[in-house]
Image (cartoon, rainbow, N blue to C red):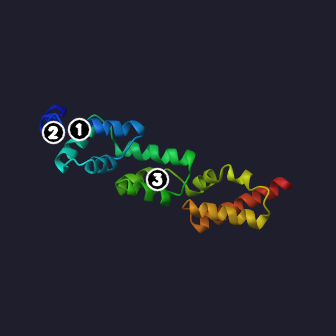
């Protein structure tokens, strides 16, 4: 259904769901599921919401594949998490598992864990070996990295540090 038809169905006194959705999209990109839930919560019926989402898809204002790629890149650069944690977040945003899997296959948990540690290594450099190791382990596990990856990275950093101190 086109925007004009939708306005006729809503009448003059009701808010336009397309305008609400577009405004919602101005803050950051959203998944189709997020738009759907937002409009449902605003009190629109399922048919109107479906029509609105269809218009947004046609005009390419929403695209779950692009959203997923941007979301993961943003997380990688600003608040790196494990692939497992990213998949969990994306799943909550209504992204299809096959899209999540395809996007995340390009990423490596070791690389993401190293990125997550970034400035933390400098911040904790003054700590003794055991406290440093414990801080790193807790931090990485909080970000969703499994124990094996965390220990592997800690050992790799310890070896690197030992080589640099010689």
Quarter residue 146 falls in:
bottom right
Q: Quadrant of the C terminus?
A: bottom right
Q: Are marks 2 and 1 in contact (CB under 8 Å)?
A: yes
Q: Distance of mark 2 from mark 3, alpha carbons?
A: 41 Å
Determine which residue is flagged by label 3.
104
Q: Nearer the viewer, mark 1 or mark 3?
A: 1
Q: Distance of mark 2 from mark 1, alpha carbons?
A: 8 Å
Determine which residue is flagged by label 1.
15
Label 1 residue SS: loop
Residue 3 position within the rendered picture, expressed as x and y whole percent measured from the top left? 19, 33
Q: Is residue 46 above or below residue 19?
A: below
At a point 34% along the width and 54% down the height, the residue shown is 96
Crowding at dot 2, Cα within 10 Å, few <14 / some 14-19 / many 20+, comes out as: some
Crowding at dot 1, Cα within 10 Å, few <14 / some 14-19 / many 20+, comes out as: few
Residue 37 position within the rendered picture, expressed as x and y whole percent measured from the top left? 30, 51
Outermost residue on the right side: it is: 166
Q: Is residue 131 above or below residue 17?
A: below
Determine which residue is flagged by label 2.
10
Residue 78 located left or right of residue 24: right
Quarter residue 129 falls in:
bottom right
């Amino acid at each position: 259904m086109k925007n004009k038809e939708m306005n006729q169905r809503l009448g003059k006194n009701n808010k336009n769901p397309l305008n609400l959705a577009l405004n919602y999209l101005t803050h950051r990109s959203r998944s189709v599921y997020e738009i759907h839930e937002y409009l449902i919560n605003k009190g629109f019926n399922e048919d109107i919401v479906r029509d609105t989402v269809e218009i947004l898809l046609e005009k390419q204002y929403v695209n779950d594949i692009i959203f997923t790629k941007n979301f993961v890149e943003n997380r990688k650069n600003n608040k790196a998490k494990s692939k497992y944690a990213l998949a969990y977040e994306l799943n909550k945003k209504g992204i299809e598992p096959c899209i999540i899997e395809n996007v995340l296959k390009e990423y490596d948990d070791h690389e993401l864990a190293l990125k997550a540690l970034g400035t933390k290594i400098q911040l904790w450099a003054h700590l003794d070996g055991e406290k440093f190791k414990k801080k790193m382990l807790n931090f990485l596990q909080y970000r969703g990295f499994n124990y094996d990856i965390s220990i592997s990275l800690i050992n790799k950093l310890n070896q690197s540090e030992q080589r640099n101190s010689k």
